[in-house]
Every structure is written in C-alpha cells, then in structure tokens.
Image (cartoon, grey):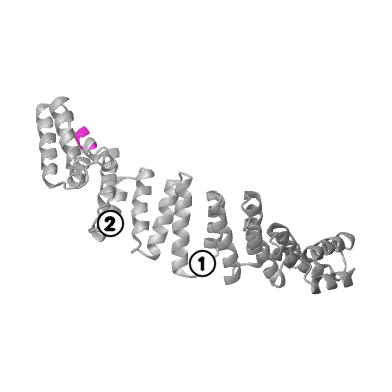
Amino acid sequence: MLKLIDGLEAMSRNRDLAVACRQYLTRYPKTPQTADITRRLAYTLEALGEYVPAAEAYKSLWEMQPNANGRDDGYAAVRLYTRSDKREDVAIGCELAEAMFDRLGPSPYTERILWHGFFQYRRFNEWAKANVVGRKMLAKNLPRDAEQKHTLHRYMAENFANQAQYTNAVESYQAARKIRQDDQNVHYYLIERMHNATMSAAQMAPVVDAYMKTYSDRFDRFSRLGYLGYAYLRDGDKIKARQIFQQTMAEHATIHSVASQYISTFGTEPAEIAAAEKGLQDAIKTNKYDAYYLQYLLGFTIYRDR
C-alpha cells in the first residue's frame, strides 16, 4: 500500500492519494510510517481546499509531538481550523492555540500563535474568551513589543465594553495610555467608558481636561466635556454641572442633551428662570453649530412652559 501511495503522489492524483492515506491510517494506525502518511494526508487535503480535515491531520501530528519539533504542525492546524466560517471549527483552532502556548511556554513563536487565537475569538464576537487569551499574554509579560502591548490593551478594552464591563474597559484603556499617551482614539473612549462606569467627576476631570487641551482643534472634545457635566450631576454638584453644560452648549448644544440638562439644573422661581434664560441667550451668541436648538429651548421650554 505504501508503493500505491508513493505512485499516486508522484502522479499528483491528490483525491485518490487522500483516500489511500486514510485507508492506510485506518488499517495501520500505529506503524513507523504513520506520521509520514498523516503528513502526506494533511498537505494533500490542504491542496484540495479541504481545510478542516487538513487541520485535523495536522492536529494529529502535533499530538504525536507536542513539543518544539511538532509546533509547525500545530500552527498549521490552528491556521486551517480558523479559515473556516463555522464557529465550532474556529473554536477548536483557538483552543489549540492556547494549548500550544501552555505547553511550549512564551516565545515569539507562541506569541504569534496566541495573537492568532485572540483575533479569531474577536472575529466571532467571543469577547470574554478573547480577553482570557489577552490576560494569558499579559501574565507572561507579552507582547514584548510596546506598541503591540498598547494594541492588546486597546482591543481588550473594546472586548470589555462589548460585555458592558466598563470598569475593566477603563483599566485597559488606562494601561494603554501608560504605554503611549498620544493615541486620540484611546483617550476618547477612555472618557466614554469612564462615563459608562459612572465614575466620579474627580476621577474624570483630569482626563477630560487633558483631552480638551491636547485636542483643542477637534470638535468632538465637547462631547467629552458633556460627560464631565453628567459626572458632576451624578455627584450632586448642580452648580459645577451647570457650568460645564453651559460651556458645552456654547459650542455644541445637542450633544448628549446638554442644553436640556443645563435647564434642569435650575428651579422654577423667577430668578432661576431668568438665569437659565440668560445662559441660553449667551450660548446662542457663540454657538455656530446648532444654535437653532437653543432657540427652540428658549422659546418653548423657558418662555412657553415656565
């Protein structure tokens, strides 16, 4: 039968070769030639585009040598399992990537395999499993490259946020900023997740102030400022919240309903209503983006309803 397999391989009759290899392995599962025939089956199936069966063959080779000698076979199995569009196939590949890392220990090679598993979990929205992999890397002080570690923290923050674990997301964004502070996207979403986590104004103010100063040319800075106003409101500091909302609506009134929240910080007494009216009028003078909304609130909420 071995001569038949050799002949089919020489003639590139891949489909017949795959059948012959499978027959051999079924009949003779434990011979000196088992590993060689399994390898031929693996690359033949891969050439035929049968990636999951090929992955199974490569996985068998890894299990025969779960060490540095078999790591290329293991990685081939991970790579081919995760080419599938089926969640269950990809899960096998990701679990194999983790098992290889646990078995072989941290190295540039296993780091690459684990990264592959991390991104494949994200591909199928397996946020929690992806972060298990991420934490496994961080526990071994991986990635070694600072920029890659920054990227890992950023992706882990996204994963946490997708599970509504906002405090954990904040911690991951903060870890990313310890590596590099000039990432506008990280800074932007750090503030958003601090808001989602209902953190105090004392915690948020330094981060928001830094964003306002660093990105003074970005219009979206007022959306971050608005979140600080809500933090003061949660803390029960209506006066400070009012000041922040007024500063925000002078540029962007509709964002996060800051103009409506500004009005809500005033009472119903005539002096309070007059103060709210003046604040809206002042904001209308400077707001070039959505002053129409301030005019609407002035006309209906103040003049008509109060």
Q: Would residue 46 be found to the left or right of residue 190 on screen? A: right
Q: Identify the mark at residue 211; answer none if there is no mark.
A: 2
Q: Is 112 in front, or is 267?
A: 112
Residues shaded magenta: 261-265
Q: Estimate the x, y position of residue 205 in percent, counting from the top left.
A: 27, 51
On screen, residue 175 versus residue 32, left or right, reads: left
Q: 298 or 194: which is nearer to us?
A: 298
Q: Residue at left 68%, top 61%? A: 49
For badge 1, the amino acid type reads Pro
Residue 118 falls in image quadrant: bottom right
Residue farthest to the top, as pictured: 305
Sort mark 1 into few (<14), some (14-19) or many (20+) by Cα contacts within 10 Å.
Answer: many
Q: Kindly identify which numbered label has been placed on residue 143.
A: 1
Task: Write down the quadrant of residue 95 in the picture.
Answer: bottom right
Q: Where, by quadrant of the figure, is residue 56 drawn?
A: bottom right
Magenta span: predominant SS is helix
Q: Position of residue 161 (x, y in %)?
A: 44, 48
Which quarter of the image is occupied by the N terminus? bottom right
